[in-house]
Amino acid sequence: MDNAKEGAAPSTGPAQGGGTSAASAAGLRGVVAASSSIGDVNGERGELIYQGYNIHDLAAHSTFEEIVFLLWHGRLPNQQELDELKQAIGASYEVAPQVFDLMRQFPRDAEPMDTLRTTISALAFYDEHARDISRAGALRTAARLTAQFPVIVAAIERLRKGQELVAPKAELNIATNFLYMLKGEMPDEREARIFDVCLILHADHELNASTFTARVVAGTLADMYNAVTAALGALAGPLHGGANTNVMRMLLEIGEVERAEEFVKNALAQKRKIMGIGHAVYKTEDPRATHLRRFSREMGERRGETKWHEISRRIEETMHREKGMYPNVDFYSASTYYMMGIPLDLYTPIFAVSRISGWTGHILEQYANNKLIRPRAEYIGPRGLKYVPVNER
Ligand code: COA
């Protein structure tokens, strides 16, 4: 029976001990839950910075490896430091053979995000230093994870297609290596650079759901594998990383440019959300979408198939006109990856190939100045009920 019907006194006010009312902070919007020098999102101005550098500057001039260093160390590397990082990553590409054996047992039709989560979790068994969360130990694990994420995502695709695995080449950067391992042939240079910038754009985004999850787990002083495995679970959801795959499914469903506007209007009339649109923080254009829109068009032109870009443009215009909303990072990454020939359900794992840099950066920051994260809930249930034996209820 419902407690209220039993005449119990309703709870009044927020949890004992004070704090913000949950009603005023649904979804923790606007609540500051950590201090961080890694990245900042200015939702009003549509600005994103990593360690003080504007994302536009980084997208134009930097590389993903430099960003990894920046997020872990708080500054851009000099040449020697960059070379050392690349060496550390190159030396960590080798995944334990037992992990591939395990992956071969997974159902071929498993969701790649599920396969990735379970595989990343299993990596810890074969890392004798997994529990070392000292700064040096955690940096070492961060390099291993950053190197092994792309190897595993490429392996997910090849194993489910019954193809031989392609070994990574230590001399290639992460973006090129990933496309090479995925397809078994060297990617075109421009395409590899576009992919490299996609990795830069997805690397960090302050306290998004998966990064917050990683910090909560790290805050218990659990090791990095635990924190990253939990973050993968958060990223999988359609309101977070899972949106990019759903954007492409929607574009395919729409199929023709002329149908886009009507599709959006129907969806809105039925109170359905358009994936890849809207953001919890940005109230204007997501600065990452500015670059991805360009890549979506360029990749379409390179492939001679601009339809997906044009449908996306039409959706964007309609959503702006009807709801005053803007595309987020997932909107144009969908058609960009589609034109790269990447399977739809790998888009979210690819998000993780990039975001592992931000997750590990935040975990390092959490370990360095740790406090267990333990908020309060505003109790809204009854109080003062008396226990009634089961046969009397
Ligand atoms: N399409 C249509 N309507 C949308 C919308 C979308 N993509 N996103 C938000 N809205 C509407 C909601 O329906 C709601 O309308 P209502 O007030 O009439 O009920 C209003 O805008 C606020 O939505 P809400 O989900 O509470 O806002 P939020 O700030 O919590 O949402 C997202 C942020 C990202 C969860 C949301 O915009 C969304 O679900 N987008 C689609 C999923 C996506 O792309 N996620 C990736 C984020 S990077």
Image (cartoon, rainbow, N blue to C red):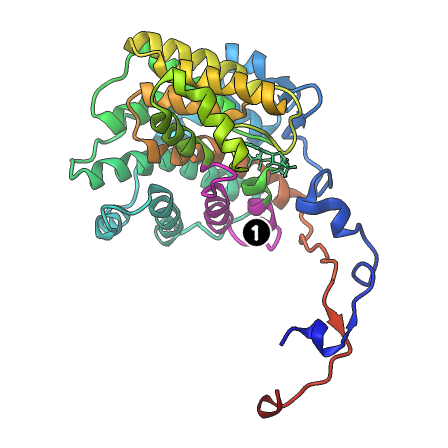
Q: Amino acid at mark 1?
A: Val
Q: Residue at x 74, y 62 (%)?
A: 379
What are the residue bounds of the magenta stretch? 213-242
User: Is residue 313 shown to the viewer in this render?
Assistant: yes
**Image location (x, y in percent) of residue 189:** 32, 11
Q: Residue at x 47, y 15 (%)?
A: 313
Q: Which residue is mark 1?
A: 217
391 versus 153 height, above or below? below
Q: Nearer the viewer, residue 313 or 197?
A: 313
Q: Residue at x 55, y 30 (%)?
A: 204
Quadrant hosting ligand 1 = top right
**Image location (x, y in percent) of residue 280:** 63, 34
Report the side of 30 relative to 174 (left or right).
right
Q: Nearer the viewer, residue 266 or 202?
A: 266
Q: Residue at x 80, y 50 (%)?
A: 20
Q: Nearer the viewer, residue 16 or 140?
A: 16
